[in-house]
Amino acid sequence: MGNELIFDTFRTLSTALIADACIRLDVPVRLGPPEIRPLAASMRLAGGVRPVRHAGSVDVFLEAVDACLPGEVLVIDNGGLVDEGCIGDLTALEVRAAEMSGIVVWGCHRDTRELLQIGLPVFSCGPCPLGPRRLDPAGPERLSLAFVGEHMVTRGDIVFADADGVLFISGHRSAEVLGCAQELWQKERGQAVSLGSGRSLRMQFQFAEYLHRREADSSYTFRKHLREINGAIEA
């Protein structure tokens, strides 16, 4: 599934819907640390992962961008460091010029004002005015994998990010997951319309019937009930 189609499909969806779809389909999902947030609440992105491990110098970012495909997301492993900002406005401009979808950093950024003016979606652990002062050895995996919190991501993975957080799935399941997420979105929008017309969730979900069945069978869960009646509010 191409990056452009992934991004276009995600426009009406959310990471919450992607996560619910993964649960429905039993697709493993890797959740980024909650401290990774968008610079602006409206920022969102989706696309193939272009991983990079930062060792203190910007050259590794240029190397990664030089090999990127349009629509990919630069996913930077800076070890979650909060005492240096490893990307700023010039890196963002380079990423945008390469037609990438945005940047996710397990670490900090700087040049916040300029980044907001540029408008490229950037997700990070927050701002830090100090740039890197170290120069560590660049390992052989610097362009093949990255860690985001406890999770390893590689090329072939897909990243989704919005105001609720950042998550990663395997690319070969992306079409299936996005299709399921669209179905869930349509169900939930229909339920919202019904709520607006005075039909409560309890009515829509046949809640009295569910309570009656649960009383007779303690193994009958609400999630099982929702799937039987084709409802959606949780995975």
Image (cartoon, grey):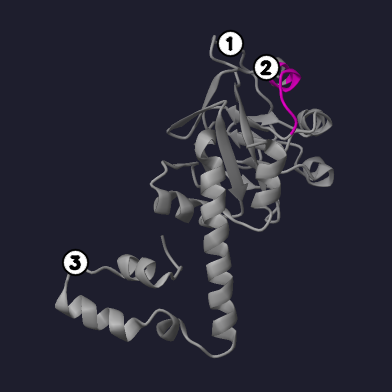
| Residue that protrudes farthest toward the bottom in the picture | 198
CA gap between label 1 and label 2 equals 9 Å
Q: Are marks 2 and 3 in contact (CB under 8 Å)?
A: no
Tag 1 near tag 2, CB within 8 Å: yes
Amino acid of disc 2: Val
Q: Depth check: 3 or 128 in front?
A: 3
Quadrant where the C terminus sits is bottom left
In this figure, which residue is indicated by the disc labeled 3?
Answer: 219
| Quarter location, residue 128 | top right
The stretch of residues the image draws in magenta is 62-70
Badge 1 amino acid: Ala
Q: Is residue 62 above or below residue 186?
A: above
Relative to 173, does residue 39 appear above or below in the rendering?
A: below
Looking at the image, residue 162 sits to the left or right of residue 205; the answer is: right
Which residue occupies the foreground of this view, 77 or 130?
77
Q: Which residue is mark 2?
A: 60
Per the image, the residue denoted by label 1 is: 138
Q: Secondary structure at mark 3?
A: loop
Across and down, in percent, residue 40 comes to 70, 52
Which of discs 1 and 3 lies nearer the camera? The answer is 3
Which amino acid type is marked by label 3?
Ser
Which element type, helix, strand or loop, lies under badge 2? helix
Is tag 2's residue or tag 3's residue first in the polypeptide sequence? Answer: 2
Q: Residue at x 56, y 43 (%)?
A: 175
Q: Secondary structure at mark 1?
A: loop
Q: Choose the circle earlier in sequence order: 1 or 2.
A: 2
Residue pictured at 53% horizontal, 76% vertical: 191
The residue at the point 53 percent across, 69 percent down is 187
